[in-house]
Amino acid sequence: METIGDAELVLDARADLGEAPTWDRATRRLMWVDMTRGVVHRFDPKSGRDVEIETGRPIGVAVPTASGAILLAAGHGFSLLDPATGRIEPVADVGPSDPATTMNDGKCDPVGRFWAGTKDVEGCRPIGSLYRLEPGGRVARVLGDVTISNGLAWSPDRTTMYYIDSATHAVDAFAVDTDGEVSGRRRHVAFPRSWGLPDGMTVDAEGSLWVAFWTGSAVRRIDPAGRVVSIVELPVSLVTSCAFGGEELADLYVTSARNGLTDAELREQPHAGGLFRLRPRVGGLAQPPFAG
């Protein structure tokens, strides 16, 4: 297995639960969230400046939209955030409010539909789901019996969707059609429990997945055949997600957390909750904004 070079700390954000990075092509910023603190971040790689937008509520994920607003998955549904005023307007709920579940990770697919799922707040019961928000505002429930809905990615040819329910310690693959309907679920790769929980992920231009490991201090690259071929080791244990960004989509950005770490662990990991960057030999694919 190839070990990829050191990751650079680009922002010592000390996020409680940094998550869900996505490259916004329109603003040339990396959008990411501090989930538990309810903050949307927009990081400018050229200046090193990071702008924070406080929402006053926990956020699962935030993505740019074609209109310039920011689409949130939070609580029990979807909402729009105006970055200029901070105003939040509801878009759609995913179902009856259930205090046992909350929205978690998500991502836009290659045609601009937004996919996001829920998780059991205790992280042990299969009571969550995966949803798809169409540009017109309709919500479709795609999967049920999910414990911790997490990473999503699509193959470069758009025929395969990859999905992580963290509790399974695996990545599953689905056939996906042009309408976003999925079928033929299969196990793409299973991971040893000693590696930690698979969390967020992204796909590169060669169709390989990059998977972040919570408590695992690493991001691993998995080729299209399901083989683990590379590892990036980080100086923090709670690695949460990753995304390609930058002008040429050549930089891999990695988010992390400090949530739940002891004082002793924080002394050993002073940059826990930071935003990291590395440049692997392969670049990524463009992430479209929500088309609605």
Image: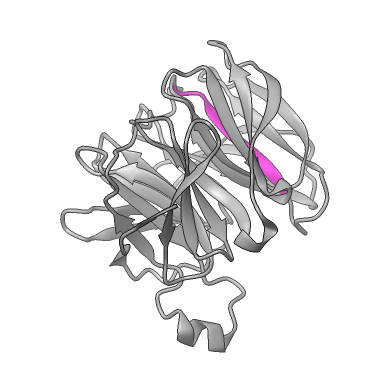
**Which region is colored magenta?**
112-119
Q: Is residue 38 magenta?
A: no
x%, y% of residue 20? 48, 48
Snapshot colouring: one colour
x%, y% of residue 218? 48, 60
Residue, far left: 46
Nearer-the-camera pick, 156 or 23: 156
Which secondary structure class fits the magenta region best?
strand
x%, y% of residue 159? 52, 17
Is residue 19 at least partly visible in the picture?
no
Nearer-the-camera pick, 10 or 40: 10
Q: How many marks?
A: 0
**Is 244 left, or right, of 192 in this rendering?**
left
Residue at the location (73% across, 29% down)?
A: 143
Residue at the location (43% across, 18% down)?
A: 157
Nearer-the-camera pick, 145 or 84: 145
Residue at the location (31% across, 60% down)?
A: 5
**Is 124 left, or right, of 150 in this rendering?**
right
Residue 205 figure quarter: top left
Is residue 173 at least partly visible in the picture?
yes
User: In the rendered image of this protein, does residue 64 appear above or below residue 271?
Assistant: above
Residue 152 figure quarter: top right
Residue at the location (75% across, 49% down)?
A: 101
Residue, far front: 1
x%, y% of residue 228? 51, 45
